Image (tube, rainbow, N blue to C red):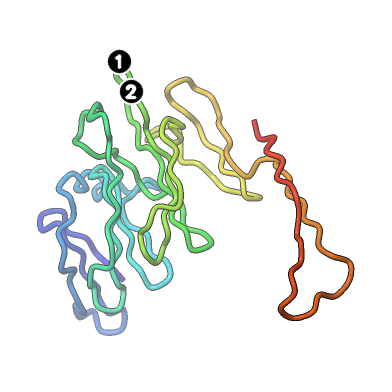
């Protein structure tokens, strides 16, 4: 199992068999993640998935460590391009859930201020590399007091505390059609494949 020390900004792997320490991380967490460490609720900082320890929180940075030896694997910065939110230059954004080899991040709004900071993000990153798959600024899903978004049937739904609306995102009703020749094509010969993509998403 893994324990976290906010004072050292590190994580420690402990053997469940002997109680001995197996490793400590070789990378320092952002100091604002201490505020995520002390909360024992679904908005906590650490998630274990696919032999990785994933951390995020008020520091606005996601880190991945190996659960085998504690080595640092990758880092993803949830940067705030406008530097408008109060806690730093990166959005406080915990890990909402991990599924299908992807890590989903949502805004960690607590008590919105006026004027409201622009662009709180919802993002999806690759679990194995930390590469950004997509990011949408301004969706504002998730709050400390209103719960975190959920995913079901490939649709993510959550509460936006900016306007008290429930927002859902997912694959839209766009359609793709493809037609191919009805007969076989000899090796080395040309064949025409045609089709359409009708983008009718709202």
Q: Measuring from the top left, give residue 168's x and y in whole percent.
A: 58, 36
For residue 171, side relative to residue 96 (left or right): right
Dot 1 falls on a residue whose secondary structure is loop
Depicted 8 relative to depicted 30: above or below: below
Which x, y percent locates residue 67?
31, 73
Q: In this rendering, is residue 83 above or below 187?
A: above
Q: CA distance from mark 1 to mark 2?
A: 7 Å
Quadrant of image for the N terminus: bottom left
Residue visible at 23% across and 45% down? Answer: 59
Q: Mark 1 sits on what residue? A: 114
- Which residue is denoted by mark 2 in the rendering? 112
Q: Whole-percent x and y of residue 144?
A: 37, 35
Q: Which residue, as the protein is rendered here, is positioned at the far top?
A: 114
Q: Residues within 10 Å of mark 2 (few under 14, many from 20)?
A: few
Q: Position of residue 71 (x, y in %)?
A: 23, 72
Give the number of callouts.
2
Q: Residue drawn 21% across and 79% down?
A: 22
Which residue is located at x 26 percent, y 49 percent? 61
Whether tag 1 and tag 2 are in contact, CB under 8 A, the answer is yes
């Amino acid at each position: 199992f893994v324990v976290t020390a906010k004072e050292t900004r590190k994580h420690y792997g402990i053997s469940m068999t002997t109680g001995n320490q197996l490793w400590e991380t070789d990378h320092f967490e952002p100091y604002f993640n201490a505020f995520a460490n002390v909360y024992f609720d679904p908005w906590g900082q650490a998630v274990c998935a696919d032999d990785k320890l994933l951390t995020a929180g008020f520091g606005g940075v996601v880190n991945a460590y190996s659960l085998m030896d504690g080595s640092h694997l990758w880092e993803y910065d949830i940067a705030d391009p406008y530097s408008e939110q109060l806690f730093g230059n990166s959005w406080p954004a915990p890990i909402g859930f991990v599924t299908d080899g992807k890590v989903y991040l949502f805004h960690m709004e607590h008590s919105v201020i006026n004027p409201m900071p622009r662009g709180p993000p919802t993002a999806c990153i690759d679990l194995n590399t930390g590469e950004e798959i997509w990011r949408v600024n301004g969706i504002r899903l998730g709050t400390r007091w209103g719960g975190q978004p959920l995913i079901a049937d490939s649709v993510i739904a959550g509460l936006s505390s900016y306007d008290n609306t429930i927002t859902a995102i997912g694959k839209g009703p766009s359609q793709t059609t493809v037609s191919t020749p009805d007969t076989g094509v000899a090796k080395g010969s040309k064949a025409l494949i045609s089709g359409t993509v009708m983008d009718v998403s709202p």
